[in-house]
Amino acid sequence: MRFPLALTAKIAAYIIGKKMRGVTKFATVLQLEPLHTCNLTCTGCGRIREYSTSIKDMMPLEDCLQAARECNAPMISICGGEPLIYPHIEELVAGLLDQKRIVYICTNATAMRRKMRDYLAFEFGRSPAGIEYHIEQLVNAELLSDKDVEQIHKGPKDPARKVIAPSDWMYWNVHIDGLERTHDLIVEREGVFKEAVAAMRMAKILGYQVATNTTVYKETDPNEIEEMFAFLSSLGIDGHTISPGYEYDAAKKDMVTRLGVSPENFFLTRKMTVAKFSKAEEWGRKFPIFGTPVYLEFLAGKRDLTCSAWAIPTRNIRGWKGPCYLMTDGHFRTYSDLLEKTNWSSYGVVNGVAKDVRCENCMVHCGYEPTASLGIQSKSGDMWKTIKFNFGARPAAVEATGITAFNGVSIGNGHTADKTPSSSAA
Ligand code: SF4
Ligand code: SF4
């Protein structure tokens, strides 16, 4: 199976329950943004630009937990900003797991190893013998230094503080947009890919579940995406989500003013998305991509879907963001307000016609995957196809033979060789 049985069963039971009660609009995944602060400035990121005036604000822990209770989505994606900067991240993860939610921590991975060292120190304080084997493995894999080990052997700084421990109900969801050179160009910092790979290797040794999320831009080479999936497969990564980039207004303005890059050279039109994703179904068969084969068919231009953005709502410091993760026409006080006060029929693309001009080029995961997974426009055979995709054998691990994943700063081919993301992020 691509996704653990217990987690699939929880989501299926939730959706069936809603459908049996005749509820037509409900949340499947909550995008929870406790803060918008980030230590990176990725080129296509709308968040750090749109919320620049409240970048230091944070949601109180209880508001985060209440948002999950309020919409009752079975899956919570903690994003941001960089959620590992949130001072209550450990308590938030623990609180959501206590609520029996499936938790994704969407991270750029720069602080992931530190959080896992905190877990090791906590475990060492509890049961030194139990964790020593892992510490040795990590030292041998050059993922812990002597200084790290010394620190871990001192135990936790505060034994009462929670840590992020491996759980069958939690995934690290690491942002990876390509191999080293492309990824570091997009995140605008050298060394981030290398650190993310080290963090994912460490997480797998410690028994965490690890997924990745990838955004495809105009300059992304589909062949490189395939190589990236093969490389991630060789690391034992559990699954992936992939989505075309959306042209955020704020990100577009930033590109023009800060980077002098024309947004047309970076973001995809619908036609370009379909061309980039022409092999999406093949990727779905070869690699453990999460979701539905129907969404992959949509990305490959084989069928039409409408938008169901209400199923993946966003809650942040200003409220429930409407209509979707990408576009902002308002922030609402409650999830019910978002559902009731949004004119959903004025968004999306129906029969090739954009209901709102800002939706014209959008085919993103958070708008269209729920349409597929909830069977909103299902055709005969879709259900069986989706069951086979998710319950069938998991795609076998792939050898990364002949793939040069570290093709950037690690081999002296960093940003200084060519600084412009739009001309070299391929
Ligand atoms: S890591 Fe995420 S939140 Fe931070 S700048 Fe990049 S895309 Fe934006
Ligand atoms: S199509 Fe849906 S998800 Fe995309 S921008 Fe429009 S409302 Fe948002």
Image: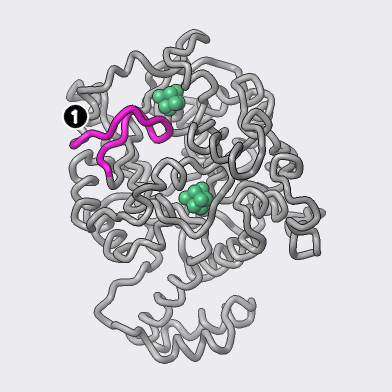
Task: State the residue lying farthest toward the front.
Answer: 257
Q: How is the image coloured?
A: one colour
Residue occupying the point 74% across, 62% down? 409
Residue 251 percent location from the top left of the image? 52, 38
Q: Quadrant of residue 14?
A: top left
In this rendering, would 384 be left or right of 191? Answer: left
Q: Residue at x 28, y 50 (%)?
A: 101
Relative to residue 29, is residue 407 depicted above or below? below
Classify the position of the C terminus by image quarter: top right
Under mark 1, the amino acid is Asp
Residue 322 lies in the magenta stretch: yes
Residue 246, image x, y percentages: 53, 32
Above or below residue 176? Residue 206 is below
Helix, strand or loop at mark 1: helix
Q: Which residue is mark 1?
A: 337
First to last magenta residue range: 318-333
Percent across and percent down for residue 83 are 40, 57
> Dot 1: few (<14), some (14–19), or many (≥20) neighbours within 10 Å?
few
- Per the picture, the main secondary structure of the magenta-coloured stretch is strand
Is 271 on the left or on the right of 171, as rendered? Answer: right
Q: Is residue 149 above or below residue 352?
A: below
Q: Is residue 132 magenta?
A: no
Q: Is residue 248 left or right of residue 161?
A: right
Residue 404 versus residue 11 in the image, above or below = below
Q: Residue at x 46, y 15 (%)?
A: 349
Near-viewer residue (342 or 406) = 342
- Identify which residue, 272 or 10, lies in the foreground: 272
Q: Residue at left 38%, top 52%?
A: 55
Viewer-proximal residue, 51 or 115? 51
Look at the image and tell me whether residue 211 can be seen: no
